[in-house]
Amino acid sequence: MFLSEDLVKSLTTLGFTTYCAKVYSALVFFGTATAAQIAETAEIPPNKVYTTLKKLENKGFVELESINSNSKSYAKRYRARNPEDVLEKLNSKYKGALDAAKNHLERIQERRERDYAEGMWILRGDSIVFGKITEMVAEAEEEVILVTDTLYDLKAYPQLAEKLKELALNGPKVRILTSIEGVNDEGEKEVLNDLNGVCEIKVYKEPFNAFYVIIDRKHLFFGSYVKRGKVLNLSAIWYDNELFSKLWSKFTKSLFKNSQKTI
């Protein structure tokens, strides 16, 4: 029998359903045939033949024979597209899918194999965020960069201000960038006077509504205030990623170059 299990299995591996594999194979055998002939030869239920033929026709694997007839007894006849053309079409389809899958999987593997840091963490709540930053600032060895739109952050959390001052007096460089609107309040001026001359403080000409800290170009904290009801809560993302931290460090230093020294 031409309709072997191996043939059906091969076609189903290529994406055919079992019925489609049998119907297409039967049509290759016949050349042209009616739905009734196909159902009998392929040994599939007659009520499934037309649905299966329609699927194959939509895929371009089967054609409805173009013969005009006004006879009510005329039965539609179908023919299979050349197997070589069909298999070439499948080959192109699966080769494209294989190439796309290969590219995406290699990209995933490439990212996995890179020397990335452990990841990132989300911190919520002012005391938790500033507490963690203060803790990590204390361990800084080379440099701390603090960017904040208002120096009042350091007025509200004096432990961080004291730690920055202590750090700057003992060697590691401390650079602070704030906005023009971040030094016009009495509390802000108090912080400015206390740290100025110990830390490098510059004022950017425009507000930037940002808060972030870079430590030793290895750790990066991004902070954002979120209003919950009438209360502002601070949340931060901590990136333990040296490459990303270095990138932001370079960007921030360009902001320092375009900022004014404090008086």
Image: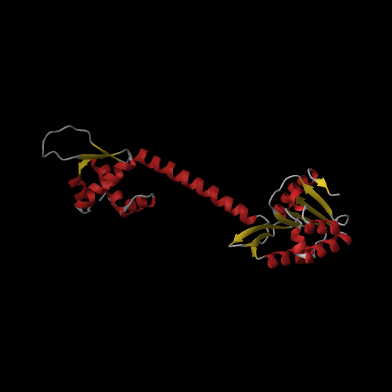
Could you say where residue 46 lies in the image, as x and y percent from the top left? 19, 51
Indicate whether 85 appears above or below 261.
Answer: above
- Give the residue furthest to the top: 68
Nearest the viewer among 41 and 147 is 147
- Give the residue furthest to the front: 186
Q: Residue at x 17, y 32 (%)?
A: 68
**In the image, is 70 to the left or to the right of 173?**
left
Nearest the viewer among 100 and 82 is 100
How many marks on residues? 0
Residue 172 seen anywhere in this rendered image of the structure: no
Could you say where residue 194 lies in the image, as x and y percent from the top left? 85, 59
Indicate whether 34 appears above or below 168.
Answer: above
**Quarter of the figure with residue 148:** bottom right
**In the image, is 111 to the left or to the right of 91?**
right
Q: Residue at x 79, y 48 (%)?
A: 203
**In the image, is 229 to the left or to the right of 54?**
right
Could you say where residue 48 lies in the image, as x and y percent from the top left? 23, 51
**Quarter of the figure with residue 241:** bottom right
Could you say where residue 37 lies in the image, as x and y percent from the top left? 18, 46
Q: Residue at x 79, y 54 (%)?
A: 176
Residue 7 seen anywhere in this rendered image of the structure: yes
Nearest the viewer among 184 and 35 is 184
**Quarter of the figure with residue 218:** bottom right
Nearest the viewer among 253 and 130 is 130
